[in-house]
Amino acid sequence: QRPILRRFSCPGTVAEDFRREEQPSGSVETGSEDKTPKKTFSEVQKERREQAQRTVLIHCPNKINEKKFLKYLSQHGPINNHFFYDSFGLYAVVEFGQKESIDSLQNGTHTPSMGMEAAIPFRSRFFNLKLKSPSHQTSEQPCVRSSNQLPPSSKKLFELLCYAESIDDQLNILLREFQLTEENTKLRYLTCSLVEDIAAACFPDCTVRPFGSSVNTFGKLGCDLDMFLDLDEIGKLSTHKTLGNFLMEFQVKNVPSERVATQKILSVIGECLDHLGPGCVGVQKILNARCPLVRFSHQASGFQCDLTTNNRFALKSSELLYIYGTLDFRVRALAFSIRCWARAHSLTSSIPGAWITNFALTTMVIFFLQRRSPPILPTLDFLKTLADAEDKCIIEGNNCTFTHDLNRIKPSGNTETLELLLREFFEYFGNFAFNKNSINIRQGREQNKPDSSPLHIQNPFETSLNISKNVSQSQLQKFVDLARESAWILQQEDVDRPSPSSNQPWGLAAFLLPSVVNKTSLAKKKVKKPASERIKNLLESIKSNTTENCTSTNGK
Ligand code: GTP
Ligand code: MG
């Protein structure tokens, strides 16, 4: 008998206890009790951004006395919080209570002389701490606790999943192990803030905001850091002096189009990152892409960064996903497992190509949850009806209005378990009429495909566009085949589930982890119950499908 606490299906009672118990406090931006008012996306962004501006990054000696370190730094002002992490060396992230402390710290810091080389004297918030007399450093120094910034290894995940008590439990474990931690989120905002300091060399009042999975609640440890250089705020700061019959404008350089302006700005920022930015390496300017960007590695944080500008839609879609991810506890758990599943079977890749993206997969999960009865998620059109004047948002002529206030959205009455939803997701998309229907989260129902792309997922804001235009027929077929196979495996779980204490792969472990997939190959599996017509059909489709070679579940 498994404890009932783990097998929740009813939000509001046992489920709430479960959430309080299982979710690390840092990951819950919105409060875990339904009565707690949930923060809006912009409230979270503003708070985190402000925190990051009071924060510094310090490369430390490997052995450091934490107490002395904090005492030394607090001569510049009170410290709100700090943590250490390892990334080819020991780093500390230190958040001061006041911004003035940063000036004080910078004023007491010198630019090193480099011997044969010369230093670019850029005064950033990224420091190097050295010991005056390393010999005084004894081996008995207490080791600092280092916060983990990496996803779990396949081995650890395998063990955790095998020992889980139910499939619901497995989905929650996956979420807990892969979701961005409080520290990782802080490091992401800090990295944006450090890049903002560099971009400010050209545009003093610019803002660099994270978007995409770093902030939309669907980020996995190890995912890239998407950044948006926001220059629009600059104009808003100026108060128009309207006295007299004059209007003052800046003299500017004119270029033929917005796109060219974007390319020029990113090109200059790319140069600044390359030449001034401490720790910014491998800077690549990808300016001819549909959405021009600068890609680079931020060495100290280990983040692969993509910097774009003039990309308001992406920021808006991050906010929409944040709303969906925060509305119901099942959304993220399901999306994480589908994304891990897709990665384990090479349906997604960190290299751009004809495969499905994580963004497209998340949209499919949202659509599926809109199609449940009763729906677990509202449609985008419904969110629009809840909007007020403040929410009104038109981007390039497209209406992107929806409520930003989560507290206006009534919780769903649907009580389906994650196990059921996972199985049904695979069945639903294993049998979806991709040849004639398009996925549409604005209306929450399928529509006729407007063109012949194999997979059509309507862009919720630029509705004439398809967010999965890149997906080839063969990649879609692979997705369908694997979805059918996984639905079948999950159906068998009812019969085949081993006892919880045995180290046997089952449930998610049976189709998530590379080493296990071969063992559960359907061709070898003994069918214990009489197959219904539907299962027979599934088997037929699976027989023609070769077992995938699986890669790591880590990373994107
Ligand atoms: P990861 O794979 O974890 O990085 O997920 P992600 O959501 O961050 O995806 P990615 O880094 O590829 O893109 C960042 C953001 O850009 C997404 O969250 C979307 O908001 C947006 N985006 C990405 N691809 C598309 C697309 O094809 N169409 C549109 N409209 N937006 C996209
Ligand atoms: Mg991303």
Image (cartoon, rainbow, N blue to C red):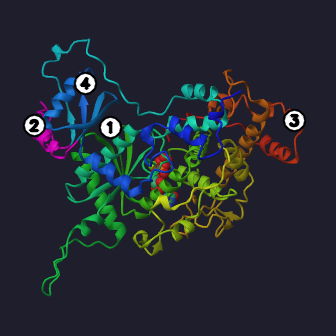
Q: Are discs 1 and 3 less than 8 Å apart at CB? A: no
In terms of secondary structure, what is the magenta stretch mainly?
loop
Q: Looking at this view, is 495 or 297 the one in front?
A: 495
Q: Position of residue 311 (x, y in %)?
A: 40, 62
Region rendered in magenta: 97-124
Give the labeled residue for mark 4: 66
Q: Position of residue 198 (x, y in %)?
A: 23, 50
Give the labeled residue for mark 1: 299
Question: Is residue 544 rendered to the left or right of residue 20?
Answer: right
Q: Looking at this view, is 226 or 505 the one in front?
A: 505
User: Mark 1 vs mark 3: which is more N-terminal?
Assistant: 1
Residue occupying image coordinates x 53% and y 55%: 324
State yes or no: residue 104 in magenta.
yes
Residue occupying image coordinates x 73% and y 49%: 427
Give the labeled residue for mark 2: 108
Q: Is residue 140 in sight in this rendering? A: yes
Q: Nearer the viewer, mark 1 or mark 3?
A: 3
Tag 4: amino acid: Glu
